[in-house]
Amino acid sequence: MILYNVTVSLDENIEADWLQWMREDHIPKVMDTGFFVERKIFKLLSHEQEGAITYAIQYFAESIEKINEYQNNYAEGLQSEHTEKFKDKFVAFRTMLEHVE
């Protein structure tokens, strides 16, 4: 199992709108691509900066190839929608992690 983690730090004054849009629009579009089998949203409780809220959106895929295909075919367009909607009110970075026992 591969975890595709998107960490987003956003202005606290857009938190409610951002979270609603993520739940109702963005995350469903990502899941509709068919490359991920599960998703979770976490709110960071430590290391906060004043005036900012940080979330981690976690998407789980069966293989790195699925994530690569998602990135090659869908990620840019979906990320552009996010950037356009919340321009200059967030920063984001992405990481991939492999589950090991």
Image (tube, rainbow, N blue to C red):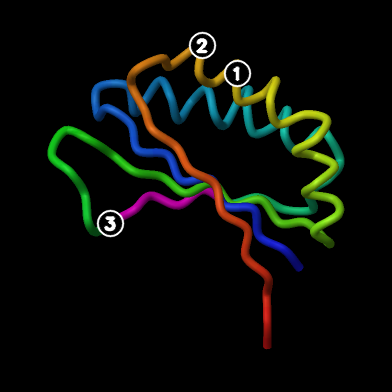
Q: Which label sits on residue 45? A: 3
**Whole-percent x, y for residue 20 in the image:** 48, 25
Image vertical order of residue 70 relative to residue 20, above or below = below
- Say which of 29 and 81 sits in front: 81
- Estimate how packed mark 3 is, as few (under 14), some (14 to 19) or many (20 or more) residues with alpha carbons within 10 Å: few
Looking at the image, residue 73 sits to the left or right of residue 49; the answer is right
Circle 1/circle 2 CB separation < 8 Å: yes
Which callout, 1 or 3, points to the residue nearer the camera?
Answer: 1
Classify mark 3: helix, strand or loop: loop
The residue pinned by badge 2 equals 84
Q: Nearer the viewer, residue 4 or 72?
A: 72
- Regarding mark 1 in the picture, which secondary structure is present there? helix
Amino acid type of the residue tagged 3 in the rendering: Leu
**CA distance separating discs 1 and 3:** 27 Å
Residue found at x 60% / y 25%: 79
| Lateral position of residue 36 relative to residue 87, left or right | right
Question: Which corner quadrant holds the C terminus?
Answer: bottom right
**First in sequence: mark 3 or mark 2?**
3
Q: Are marks 1 and 3 in contact (CB under 8 Å)?
A: no
Assign the N terminus to one quadrant of the image. Answer: bottom right
- In this rendering, which labeled residue sits more in front, label 3 or label 2? 2
Residue 36 badge: none
Q: Main secondary structure of the magenta part?
A: strand
Q: Amino acid type of disc 2?
A: Glu
Residues at marks 1 and 2, CA–CA distance in whole angstroms: 6 Å
Q: Quadrant of residue 73?
A: top right
The residue tagged 1 is 80
Q: Crowding near pointer 2: few (<14 within 10 Å), some, many (20+)?
A: few
Q: Is residue 92 above or below residue 90?
A: below
Horizontal and vertical percent position of residue 93: 48, 43
Give, as a single range, the part of the protein colored magenta: 41-45
Comes first in the chain, label 1 or label 3: 3
